[in-house]
Image (spheres, rainbow, N blue to C red):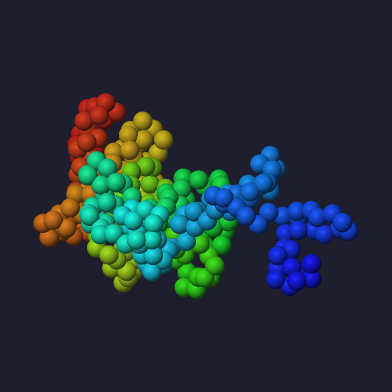
Amino acid sequence: MIRAEETGLTEGFLWEGTRLEVSEWLLSYLGLPLGGNPKTIGFWDPVVERISRSYFLFLFKIPISIASKIEKLQRDFLWSGAGEGKKDHLIRWDVVCRPKKLGGLGFGKISLRNIALLGKWLWRFPRKRNGLWHKVIASIYGTHPNGWDAKMVVRWSHRCPWKAIAQVFQDFSPFVRLVVGNGERIRFWEDLWWGNQTLCSQFAGLPWVPPRSIVDTMVIVFKGLGNSLRGKTLWQIACLTLLWMVRQERNNRIFEDKGRTEEMLWDLLLFYSSLWASCTAAFNGVPLSV
């Protein structure tokens, strides 16, 4: 008995007097202990632990070296099976990773899948504003003006999962299409309208402080329209005219390298607003000059 204890053969057994009992099962098959009771919760702990590890790609950016090791295991298992012998790879791994409809097996690359899983958090961030996790992130870092992310800070904690999630925004943003709403979330002075710089950076020498949003701009410029039918109609037309002109001016500067001055844009805004307003029933019979 003493010799057995020295060699570790008694591990997992309880010796009480003349009776020998099994305290824990050391052997397992497919991750489950042999001889255990499957009706108990603890019996399934190894399965839960293994499944939980698969969610790492959902929270953290996987290193390139680790992704390469995982893909190597996949390649070796695909061509060699469970055996130890090495076999030739019959098809390039890029072809195997393609979707099935493109002739592949749909494996997918680990790094791309990791980016896609992290991008799901960016998709949920502006859509799940009532979630506890959203409130925690917003309270710590604040919300970015783009509405899709938290503010980028200089010093991130290495334990913060949101650092890896925020870094995916550059890959995520080209596949996002913004829909024009009521203008409350559009920041006239801080958004990117032309080029890679905000308006506050391009026109830093302006003698006036512009409003924060398009809605504020329209309220300041057209605050005297009133609540009459004509006032409300002209307000709606002015908003639509402004959005249409911003889009047209953006396209002209990007694709045709042409642009108008501020005075020309303002005159066109008044002209188109008056022209379109004259076509409505509210301004029937009113001269165009009014």
Q: The C terminus lies in which quarter of the figure?
A: top left
Q: Is residue 88 above or below residue 4?
A: above
Q: How many marks?
A: 0
Residue 156 visible from this viewpoint: yes
Q: Is residue 98 above or below residue 152?
A: above
At a point 53% along the width and 70% down the height, the residue shown is 157
Pinpoint residue 39: horizontal percent, then vertical percent: 68, 39
Pinpoint residue 7: horizontal percent, then vertical percent: 70, 71
Task: Choose between 79 and 129: the one closer to the eye.
Answer: 79
At a point 38% along the width and 46% down the height, the residue shown is 183
- Figure quadrant of residue 94: bottom left
Pinpoint residue 202: horizontal percent, then vertical percent: 28, 68
Q: The N terminus lies in which quarter of the figure?
A: bottom right
At a point 33% along the width and 50% down the height, the residue shown is 107
Residue 71 visible from this viewpoint: no
Determine whether, in the image, residue 129 is placed left or right of residue 64. Answer: right
At a point 57% along the width and 59% down the height, the residue shown is 139
Task: Choose between 155 and 37: the one closer to the eye.
Answer: 37
Task: Choose between 197 and 68: the one closer to the eye.
Answer: 68
Pinpoint residue 196: horizontal percent, then vertical percent: 27, 65
Determine whether, in the image, residue 191 is placed left or right of residue 254. Answer: right
